[in-house]
Amino acid sequence: MVTSTSPVPSSQEASGRPEEGPRQADSPPTDLHQPALYVNRETSWLAFNARVLSEAASSHWPLLERLKFLAIHASNLDEFFMIRVSGLHEQLEAAALVEMSPDGLSPREQLTRIGLIIRRQLATAHALLSKELLPALSEHGIHVRDWPSLDPGTMQLARQYFRRSVFPVITPLAVDPGHPFPFLSNLSLSLAIEARDPDSRERRFARVKVPESLPRFIPLDDLDPSTARPHWKEFLPLEQLIGANLDDLFPGMEILGCHPFRVTRDMDMDILEEEAHDLLSIVNRQIRRRRFGACVRLEVDVRIPDAVRGFLREKLEIDEEDVYESTGPLGSRSLMSIATLNRPELRDPPIVPRIPVILADGADVFAAIRRQDILLHHPYDSFSSVLGFLRLAAADPQVVAIKMTLYRAGAHAEAVRSLIHAAENGKEVAVSIEIKARFDEETNIAWAQALERAGAHVFFGHAVLKTHAKVALVVRREADELRRYVHLSTGNYNTSTARLYTDLGLLTADADLGEDVSELFNSLSGFSKKPRHRKLAVAPTALADALLAKIDGQAALARAGKPARIFAKMNALVDAEVVRALYRASMAGVPIDLCVRGVCCLRPGVPSVSENIRVSSIIGRFLEHERVFVFGAPGEEEFFLSSADWMPRNLHRRVEVLFPIEAEVLRQQIRDEVIGPALADNSRAYEMKEDGQYVQRTNRDDAPAINAQGEVLDRIHRRGSLSVAKP
């Protein structure tokens, strides 16, 4: 038993609300499966994206950060259509697969609701861009022009740029009896061209693809460096430049209209177990098939003529309800190129991640880990500490083996380069690479091939299970024995995302965890099927049961009149069995705080069911990504970190790990840097209501504004060194 020196506050204490204590249901319902107790997964995800959009509208953020949130909102919608909406369409087309959602909606009903919500969000986003963000950018010397607003001299420079850099790349494609309608690739921006032959008066149609290899927004000041001014940037959308120079593409023709449009296709990848005799070749084939996925969304300019709109719908075989109009630029995710301009005064101030002294250059890292478990909190703590651990292991002559899982390594994976170096140094290197990681398949296949060329053992796992666990094992010869060093994390071995996502990682030489991790790798590479481990809980065999047992254990304590409590922080809460367990715990009187960044299908505050559950979501500068689970009242807590959200896919269709944090000083670090700030945030946190809607927390007039991520930054700055402890 560990006694906390700083008990975790309840959400009421953290927000200044009076503590009423847990309430128990007088007459609990007998059926926790009733649809009214669940929030629809798809509409909950859209509510999350609405919170992202709200941040774009918030003057709390510097101007370019607001534009960044707007671009993220658009990018999120793209993926939502490619995966979630496409899945609903597939259910409609295959009647045998149709199933009602836990909240009782059919796929058709969900699609109808989705359409209404997204159209409202798009109207808000377009108005925000045109009426607030673009005018504000102009005030700071950043102008997004349209063609008619250019002066003659700039028009001439732009035309020259078109002939020099755009014209050679473009291929206009006519559509007529001799030229079939061309294939439109996913997320490609195109121009529908209406033209007329001045001699025959025949109307013609053509499609011009806006080249993805060129900047979406042409920097006009770069066309004539002599006119460049400090803090002044002018951009012209590429589609407008092309539209203004169609005479060069269709000489001798009368241009009647130019209408931007954009398509989104089904990009989900289904691999049947009986087909996957060679997983690598199957994934490669599925990647090639993706470009031919069914069209699930058509975006058009609001001014597009009905005839052209109907023509595109017919050729793309898409219903009117899947057509989305826009008054702004199509594919707003491309605004990220402007949001990342080098204008420090319009961006968040940079942070310098800390490198703990114990892991600094020149330190004996292995000795440090032998003495003390080390908890790293990214991006506040530098990811270079993890990369340095791997580089050292690759070069250390005492290290005999390195094993590692890779899910999203990234295009410039420093971790993979260390593994290649280790293999070239003659060490035993074994790597589980998830080549089914959505949209990272090609990158991961390339790294797998590079590792194999270096002599590493590479394995891809099960056809229907993704390996999502984040684990590294270093085996080192010390004196007459082999010692294991382990890194376990909630996030990927990806340098880029480690600067943008909040994650927690543990470096340890704990013998039981080392033994568990060795057995985990044997199960990934071989045929072993160990259902239980000493300290790890591994999905799909044991993690769900472990979580349910912990939740039910707190309910049993509460029913016995003993103190109980649950805190959980994650990206998504979807699994219905877990939701029902939380409902039962709430009905028993357990106070439960859930910090769920994205989708949450549980309804808090339902009388007699979830009165003791509070749900919040934090949208901040960094993407909240860590999974932290705490069971027990102050002084009795058990702390766990995990790679898994509480979703069916994580608990039942992926290889995931749940691991304990046992050192009290590291638990206190989690209280100070995760739990306390999350519950106290009254600035960037949103409270979920019983109806599934979210309301942003606000501070009272006499209370200071608290921003969870800002609090952590301040604490890290004041701390001076990383908290470490013996396990």
Image (spheres, rainbow, N blue to C red):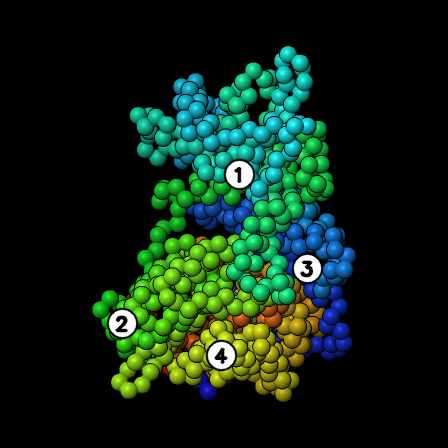
SS at circle 2: loop
Q: Position of residue 399 (x, y in %)?
A: 30, 75
Q: Would you say the residues marked 1 and 3 are in contact, meaning their CB atoms lie under 8 Å apart?
A: no
Question: Which quadrant of the structure image shows residue 654?
Answer: bottom right
Q: Amino acid at mark 1?
A: Leu
Q: Earlier in the sequence, mark 4 or mark 2?
A: 2
SS at circle 4: loop
Q: Position of residue 490 (x, y in %)?
A: 46, 67
Q: Residue under circle 2?
A: 396
Real-space Cα separation, disc 1 to disc 2, in angstroms: 53 Å
Q: Residue at x 73, y 70 (%)?
A: 33
Real-space Cα separation, disc 1 to disc 3, in angstroms: 29 Å
**Front of the two marks 1 and 3:** 3
Q: Position of residue 102 (x, y in %)?
A: 71, 64
SS at circle 3: loop
Nearest to the observer: residue 285 or residue 649: 285
Q: Does 137 sit above or below residue 490?
A: above
Real-space Cα separation, disc 3 to disc 4, in angstroms: 32 Å
**Front of the two marks 4 and 1:** 4
Query: Is 612 on the left or on the right of 94, as rendered?
Result: left
Q: Residues within 10 Å of mark 4 (few under 14, many from 20)?
A: many
Q: Amino acid at mark 4?
A: Leu
Q: Residue under circle 1?
A: 129
Residue sitting farthest toward the top: 199
Q: Earlier in the sequence, mark 1 or mark 2?
A: 1
Q: Residues within 10 Å of mark 3 (few under 14, many from 20)?
A: many
Q: Residue under circle 4?
A: 536
Q: Which mark is residue 365?
A: none
Q: Residue under circle 3?
A: 40
Query: Is 113 on the left or on the right of 250, as rendered?
Result: right
**Front of the two marks 4 and 2:** 2
